[in-house]
Amino acid sequence: MPSPALLSSTLSSSWSLSSIIYTGIKYSVIGSWVFLALWLFRLLVFWPWRSRLRLLPGPPPPGGLFGSHLGRLIDPDTSPKYHEELREKYGLNMKFHGLGYFDERFLTFDPVAMNFILGRGAELFPKPWITKRFIGAIIGNGLFLSEGEEHRKQRKIISPAFSAQSLRALTPIFFTKSQEVRDILAQRCKALDAPAAKVDMQDLFRRATLDIVGLSLFDSAFDSLKDDTNEMYRAFSCLIDAGIPHGSGLMGVVNLWFPWITKAFPDEHMRKLTACHEVLTRVGGGILQKKKTKVLQDMSAEKQCSSKDIMSLIVRSNLDAPAEDRLSDEALLTQINALIFVGSETTAIGLSWALNFLALNPQVQQKLREELIACSHPTDTSTTQSNILSLPYLDHVIKESLRLVPSVQSTVRAAAQDTVVPTSDGKGVLIRTGQFVHVAIEGFNTRKDVWGEDAFTFRPERWSDSDPRKATVLRETPGLIGGLMTFILGPHACPGYQYAMLEMKAILGTLLPAYTFEPAPGATIGMCNFALSNRPFVRGEGHSCQMPLSVKPYNP
């Protein structure tokens, strides 16, 4: 038997250990409650008190702790009219509530404010972490997400590849693939014993634009218009489709706020995203190394870059840069996903909406068709292509479609420090560190006080120099293209906007002389703001991205 002294010592030690554990748990609980109380005080009391946005006009809080205006602002079914309603009622600069009454955000339709936020004050308003995390999971952390000095380095390396001279060398690729689409439509119309064929034009455009990206960016034939066997096509399509549920629902929220959870316990969509990225990284890495080897051979022979694809030009630009400005192979590789996405998916969606507008407006479609036929040269293909790309009415049609349905409906910036944003009335607005600015691209593009009472109407003629509102449009709507906010502006403006415009002109200019397009019977087209883009879908058939149209050969 243990002695009484030993027993007493053992009990005393056990009691001391239990006491320490109990005390530790007690103070941990107390500390947690104190932390929570301080956090709630900061969120619910201090932040609203310190915000100077409360001095601005704006819609009243929707009610409740988490009442929000975001739903109506980003839902494509309500956002166009809601933007106009807010501007008419509260003016050019206002506040609204994001995730709750405590989350006051700045919404502006003021060109002076927007030029500052996206232009000379861009470094003071970077993309917030939540945007970077969501977009980065789909297309990687390349040029479209980088900030500051890293962004300047990337843009300096990449921009020369999208010069006018470089793009002119790529136009034959645009037209070759456009003609393939035209031939595919001929086959489908011939195969059906019906006046017209119902064709998902979004699927065709995705394949065509991805093929164009393969040839123009990498000098690689993806041939996705022929079949689905290409590894890059399958991986990219999977990446975009998996990206929709990735950003929605409970798991989307969990992944944004607690990414380590979905990495440790990945669901089906996360596994798909990972697998797609592995394929794109492996194949893209192989392409990059081949391009680098070829460029180095040209440099050793003191020759100009013999390959004219965009990736070769980027690699050459990178190797020509001073050592401190060069991008690593890993940094170059991260640009591939972003360039594929912007060069194909957003352009394909833009083409789908443009063709849908033409299907809904047959008089505009016929006018454009007649002008395209008139500019065709009977024997000289290069002259015909040049005429198509320079046709004013085709330019007007594409701009009008991009005005009404921009590739991205809106974007968000967050103040990196307390900043006074200049406004057209000279008063300025103080944005506190961490507060969000809502960049309403769609709202700028459809202001009735700028575009007139028919601002929501598809009318390409408004882009003519003779339109009486043209001067007002250019003055009141900032943008990389005058009067169009779709490609935004400033250092983060889309570097490939001319590429996208040329691609759209080549495809529409090739298809319209050969076919007429009408709405598909029984298909009501809706719009969903998913996977970074205003994607078309058929109501009643889920949110799968598609644009079915009725297609038949044009007979004059």
Image (cartoon, helix red, strand yellow):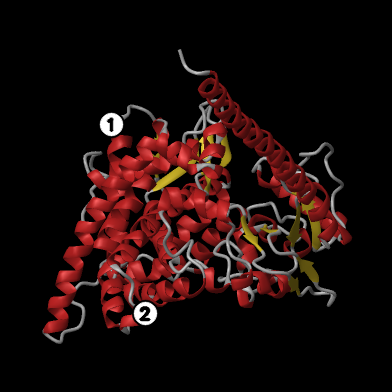
Q: Residues within 10 Å of mark 1 (few under 14, many from 20)?
A: few
Decide: is 542 above or below 275: above
Residue furthest bottom in the image:
302
Q: Residue at x 50, y 51 (%)?
A: 133
Tell me which numbered mark, 2 or 1, is placed earlier along the sequence: 1
Asked if marks 2 and 1 touch (Cβ < 8 Å), the reply is no
Report the disc number at residue 501.
none
Q: Which quadrant would residue 402 be assigned to in this image?
A: bottom right
Give the mark toward the camera: 2 or 1: 2
Please state which amino acid type lies under the numbered disc 2: Asp
Please state which amino acid type lies under the numbered disc 1: Ala
Decide: is 336 above or below 276: below
On the picture, is 263 further left or further right than 396? Answer: left
- The kind of secondary structure element at disc 2 is helix
On the picture, is 269 further left or further right than 323? Answer: right
Q: Which quadrant would residue 312 be assigned to in this image?
A: bottom left
Q: Residues within 10 Å of mark 2 (few under 14, many from 20)?
A: some
On the picture, is 117 further left or further right than 189? Answer: right
Q: Position of residue 232 (x, y in %)?
A: 26, 47
Dividing the image into 4 quarters, which one contains the N terminus? top left
On the picture, is 312 further left or further right than 474? Answer: left
Mark-to-mark CA distance, 2 and 1: 56 Å
Q: Residue at x 40, y 57 (%)?
A: 338
Q: In this figure, which residue is indicated by the disc labeled 2?
A: 325
Decide: is 310 above or below 69: below
Q: Position of residue 109 (x, y in %)?
A: 74, 63
Q: Position of residue 406 (x, y in %)?
A: 57, 55
Q: In this figure, which residue is indicated by the disc labeled 1?
A: 191
Q: Which quadrant would residue 420 be assigned to in this image?
A: bottom right
Residue furthest top in the image:
1
Q: Position of residue 172 (x, y in %)?
A: 28, 65
Residue 540 visible (yes or no): yes
